[in-house]
Image: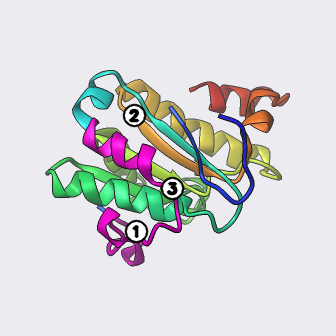
């Protein structure tokens, strides 16, 4: 689907407590949530086929809201799901000050949840160290053979034309 500024573009347990309240019933039609709602409704099939979701779009189009609605809908169905921001994950895994116990707790959540969502997954201007952490997180999930939901301001054309080897490997997973 082509990028459309101002609109959400969709391609085929909460750490942040402020996201708990978001649900499809609260959609005031500001956002186009049809594809995300369909993903929740077709969850069993999507999970069986390891089909993730990437939500792209400009700032303020509802990517985080949509991801939160989806995670909450799955939690309501009894499906284990988590949503993290990329900043949170890179702080946990990229810091020498984070305890191994905390890192292992996050690894367990990433490996065992049926769906994880990573919000604000923007790789522009990231250091090699942060990109390495991003690859570790995505690769960890990839090896579980379970889907990921990503929200990003990076437009689809930038994703498919990426030149950096490590970023291409991350996007490929």
Magenta span: 14-42
In this figure, which residue is indicated by the disc labeled 2? Answer: 147
Q: Is residue 133 visible?
A: yes
Of label 1 and label 2, which has the lower sequence position? 1
Per the model, the C-alpha gap separating discs 3 and 1 is 9 Å
Q: Secondary structure at mark 2?
A: loop
- Front position in the image: 31 or 67: 31
Is residue 37 one of those drawn in magenta? yes
Q: Position of residue 73 (x, y in %)?
A: 26, 56
Per the model, the C-alpha gap separating discs 2 and 3 is 22 Å
The outermost residue toward the top is 49
Q: Which mark is residue 32?
A: 3
Which image quarter is the N terminus in?
top right
Q: Is residue 101 visible?
A: no
Q: Which mark is residue 27?
A: 1
State left or right for residue 4 relative to residue 74. right
Is residue 148 one of those drawn in magenta? no
Q: Secondary structure at mark 1?
A: loop
Q: Quadrant of residue 111?
A: top left
Above or below, comparing residue 9 to residue 171 in the picture: below
State left or right for residue 104 relative to residue 166. left
Q: Residue at x 75, y 28 (%)?
A: 160
Q: Residue at x 74, y 44 (%)?
A: 155
Q: Position of residue 15 (x, y in %)?
A: 38, 67
Asked if labels 3 and 2 touch by Cβ distance under 8 angstroms, the answer is no
Q: Position of residue 140 (x, y in %)?
A: 45, 34
């Amino acid at each position: 689907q082509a990028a459309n500024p101002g609109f959400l573009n969709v391609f085929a347990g909460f750490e942040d407590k402020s996201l708990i309240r978001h649900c499809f019933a609260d959609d005031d039609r500001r956002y186009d949530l049809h594809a995300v709602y369909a993903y929740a409704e077709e969850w069993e099939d999507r999970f069986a086929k390891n089909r993730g979701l990437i939500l792209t779009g400009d700032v303020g189009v509802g990517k985080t809201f949509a991801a939160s609605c989806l995670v909450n809908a799955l939690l309501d169905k009894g499906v284990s799901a988590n949503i993290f921001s990329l900043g949170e994950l890179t702080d946990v895994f990229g810091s020498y000050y984070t305890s191994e116990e905390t890192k292992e707790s996050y690894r367990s959540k990433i490996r065992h949840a049926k769906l994880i969502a990573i919000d604000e997954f923007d790789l522009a201007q990231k250091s090699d160290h942060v990109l390495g952490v991003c690859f570790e997180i995505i690769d960890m999930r990839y090896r579980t053979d379970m889907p990921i939901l990503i929200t990003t301001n990076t437009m689809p054309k930038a994703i498919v034309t990426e030149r950096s080897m490590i970023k291409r490997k991350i996007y490929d997973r």
